[in-house]
Amino acid sequence: MVESLSRPFPYNPQVPCTFQIQTTAGSARRGQLIAPHGTIETPVFMPVGTLATVKGIPQDLLEEIGPEIILSNTYHLYLRPGVETVRRLGGLHGFMSWPRPVLTDSGGFQVFSLSDLRKVREEGVTFRSHLDGSSHFFNPESSMEAQIGLGADIIMAFDECTEHPADARRTRESMELTLRWAARSKKYFEEHKHEVPWRHEVPWKEVASNQSPIAINPGLLAAGDRPPAAEQQLFGIVQGGMDLALRKESAERTIEIGFPGYAIGGLSVGEPRHLTREVVEATLEHLPADKPRYLMGVGTPEEIVEYAAMGIDMMDCVLPTRAARHGLLFTSEGRISIKQARYAQDEAPLDPKCPCRVCQRYSRAYLRHLYAANEVLAQVLNTIHNLSFYLDTMRTVRQAISLGDTPRFPHAAER
Amino acid sequence: MVESLSRPFPYNPQVPCTFQIQTTAGSARRGQLIAPHGTIETPVFMPVGTLATVKGIPQDLLEEIGPEIILSNTYHLYLRPGVETVRRLGGLHGFMSWPRPVLTDSGGFQVFSLSDLRKVREEGVTFRSHLDGSSHFFNPESSMEAQIGLGADIIMAFDECTEHPADARRTRESMELTLRWAARSKKYFEEHKHEVPWRHEVPWKEVASNQSPIAINPGLLAAGDRPPAAEQQLFGIVQGGMDLALRKESAERTIEIGFPGYAIGGLSVGEPRHLTREVVEATLEHLPADKPRYLMGVGTPEEIVEYAAMGIDMMDCVLPTRAARHGLLFTSEGRISIKQARYAQDEAPLDPKCPCRVCQRYSRAYLRHLYAANEVLAQVLNTIHNLSFYLDTMRTVRQAISLGDTPRFPHAAER
């Protein structure tokens, strides 16, 4: 009687996920990552949509802001609404009605950072939910099972995020565990990847005639061809703490296992920023140039430009969305704490150089009022602006690389 | 250096506000109310935007949902951000960047319902802020001053909302006070209405060439004419408790003072619904047929249809927006409490007959997940739907009257 909304979004039936570097500028790379649900222009910043929502932003507004891929958290979705619910609704794309690529993390980082009474063994991790204290178990196999059920375009190996500081022995043991878990993640994934909820659901001809907003690459196949089914891509994660030799070893042995993309994990865990930069630089040397390189959990607007200049292709961070909820806004003139009384009668737009729908319509005075009055619209508008600023920053980075320039973050004075 | 956003919105330079009834069906009336910032099709439902925001909804999405007028609360805006701030930013239209008509209440109702240690005297009301306990004073003159500064298209006389139950003597005394305050409200308004922040600011030629989304009525003036300045309209409020004789007297004596529109106040204060209906019906008989009639603070979808059928032209209520925040959704199939576990895997849209962007894109399962996970997007999407349902209901009512049919609310089974 009631028409179902659960038809899956069409996807780009290219297999496997391919990455092409179009041009370089110094160490920086301008490329394209072709994923089942769309083509991702790199370097790319991925907004975080923890619980299958970028907090406060309807999906149609999010599409307009323009991220080509968003990140969602396996740990959170496993607890609420549960993987099986998402899987039955067609995976994350169908569940949250988001047609573009999605990446899920493995759940490992949240298990380590959010849950109590964590117990790590060779087999996996026992932990208690941060919501209700209930007991759960994650291991490489169950993380893969969850991530296949969630159906993101790119999924991550189950790793242990080494704490900081950690001594040499602890760092090596943790790295070795991550390597064994990486092999187990890959094995389970290869055996079960056909279980992804959107696989086989949309034959090529239907995709080709569908008026979806997704950019399908029609040149990939001749008209009428039935292509091989699209597949999720499992990325490996390099650990090794702040030890450059261990980072090298972790990179080499993760590459030996073999993944279509590699992440640098275990950073932004409290270490000083110069150390992060040093570890990223050293690790990048040992990653294959023809595969996407993903730096997890960074950073400020200045940092994402800097890491892109170093040769990072993918980044994610809660900073733009979380800062927005606390009234901290990134602008071409620097950071603005909109709660300050100095903005109470400021008629200017938040950022006079920003084309986003917030800066085009509202004054700082209005944004300050919404924040001071604890109005939900403050979070909505602040998030729209901060994400627009981050994504515009990455567009500028890509443009610079295309022109052969090393991307750099302009000082406020120059803007 | 920074371009100001504070240019006022253009307004329709028709003076004074005019109301025209186009057709009737039984007691129901289909009309147009021409206000400075646009033409309002009646019967109309006015969403509530307490603090210069319809909670959680960006103004561009609100424009799309389509209210022709919204209501904002003088009491709340007086406390935060303060009338002077709103006035300096061009009044509510400029402050919140809302180009269409706005109505403000007098502050009286909130003083009576929200504040502590209220003390009513002939001169006015002393009250304590519900925010910080600070002491304030409202009277007819200060309410008019505030409402002129806020610059809504339609403003309300300062009245005493009689509590329920109240005995005969108390009800009469309260009604007499409201009448004296109505005369004082009108006197102050007439002497100060030229102080409205948007008056004289936009000459006609600029208005005519502006590409604003506001519907200007170009036939009102010949091209190039400079029109008389637009003015706010002050409506009177009929009180009298549940006493039909006092309601009649209040209506007659309020009409003697003379206003361009009349509201029925003091209802929905805890009395049984049949009594509300009886008082509305009895009061309507004594209101002039050629002036807009505004029933304050109602109601459910069924009630707004019923009151429109009785001849009410304007209504407002927090119900659609407040219920949305509590997960109570109005649909063509009846009410849905989206928090219920039965919707956890429901692939259907919230209301299969609703054209709103929520029902077109998301499943009940997703909306249930957002609500259960306490995600802000739940409030945003639920509010969009409930307001769309209310406004669609009123569109259907207007269409019925235009066709000569008495509006009635269809039973779920018939839909």
Image (cartoon, coloured by chain):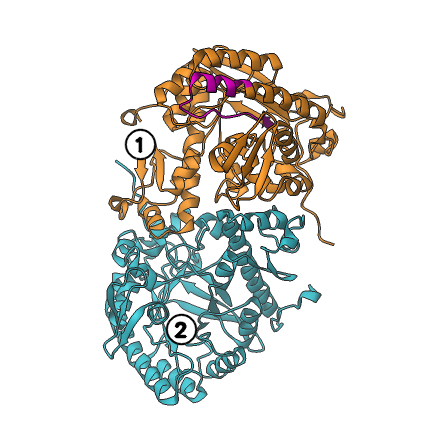
Chain colours: A cyan, B orange
Q: Position of residue B276 (x, y in %)?
A: 40, 20
Q: Nearer the viewer, residue A26 or B414?
A: B414
Q: Which mark is residue A261?
A: 2
**2 and 1 marks on the same chain:** no
Give coordinates of residue B213: x percent, y percent.
60, 35
Q: Residues within 10 Å of mark 1 (few under 14, many from 20)?
A: few
- Name the quadrant containing residue B403: top left
Which image quadrant for residue B164? top left
Mark identifier at residue A130: none
| Residue at x 38%, y 40% (from the top left corner) | B359
**Residue B284 visible to an observer of this rendering:** no
| Disc 2 to disc 1: CB gap under 8 Å | no
Q: Chain of mark 2?
A: A
Front-lying residue, B48 or A178 = B48
Residue at 63% across, 29% down: B144
In the picture shown, does residue B62 fall above or below B35?
below
Residue extent of the magenta highlight: B154-176
Mark 2 or 1: the one toward you: 1
Q: Which residue is mark 1?
A: B334
Q: Disc 1 sits on a residue from what chain?
A: B
Location of the C terminus of chain A by quadrant is: bottom right
Q: Viewed as shown, does residue B189 lie left or right of A139?
A: right
Question: x, y (%) of residue A374?
Answer: 51, 49
Amino acid type indicated by mark 2:
Gly
Name the amino acid type tagged 1: Gly
Q: Secondary structure at mark 1?
A: strand
Q: Is B172 colored magenta in this rendering?
A: yes
Whole-angstrom CA distance, mark 2 to mark 1, is: 50 Å
Residue B244 image offset from top left, x and y in percent: 44, 12
